[in-house]
Image (tube, rainbow, N blue to C red):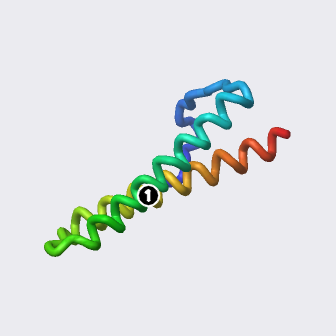
Amino acid sequence: MKPVKDEPKIIVELRPDQLASLIDALGLASECEQEDAECLNSMDRVNAQCVADTVARQDKYAKLAAWMQHVQEESE
């Protein structure tokens, strides 16, 4: 989805420690989703859609954490 030029924006101001906390929380959430996917895959009856949803969430958390890490590095 491409941003629209006149699209309203929400501006968030964070202290460096707050941004670091968000990055850590997203990283932990990503790791938890990865562990959940591994547990689900090890079950006798695997619900493929449930595993796919879990992996998708893990990917979103990891990408968001990486983007926020980039923002943090650019601000230093």
Total marks drawn? Answer: 1
User: Which picture quadrant has residue 45?
Assistant: bottom left
Q: Residue at x 27, y 66 (%)?
A: 40
Name the side, left or right, on which 17 lies relative to 65. right
Give the structural element (helix, strand or loop) at label 1. Answer: helix
How far across and how far down the image is residue 54, in percent? 33, 59
How far across and how far down the image is residue 12, in percent? 62, 26
Please tell me whether residue 9 is drawn above or below residue 44 in the rendered image: above
Q: Residue at x 28, y 72 (%)?
A: 41
Q: Residue at x 22, y 66 (%)?
A: 49
Which quadrant of the figure contains the C terminus? Answer: top right
How far across and how far down the image is residue 44, in percent? 16, 75
User: Which picture quadrant has residue 46?
Assistant: bottom left
Name the side, left or right, on which 24 lies relative to 60. right
How far across and how far down the image is residue 20, in percent? 67, 37
Please tell me whether residue 4 is drawn above or below residue 9 in the rendered image: below
The residue closer to the viewer here, 33 or 66, is: 33
Q: Residue at x 59, y 49 (%)?
A: 65
Name the side, left or right, on which 45 lies relative to 8. left
Residue of label 1: 58
User: Which picture quadrant has residue 56?
Assistant: bottom left
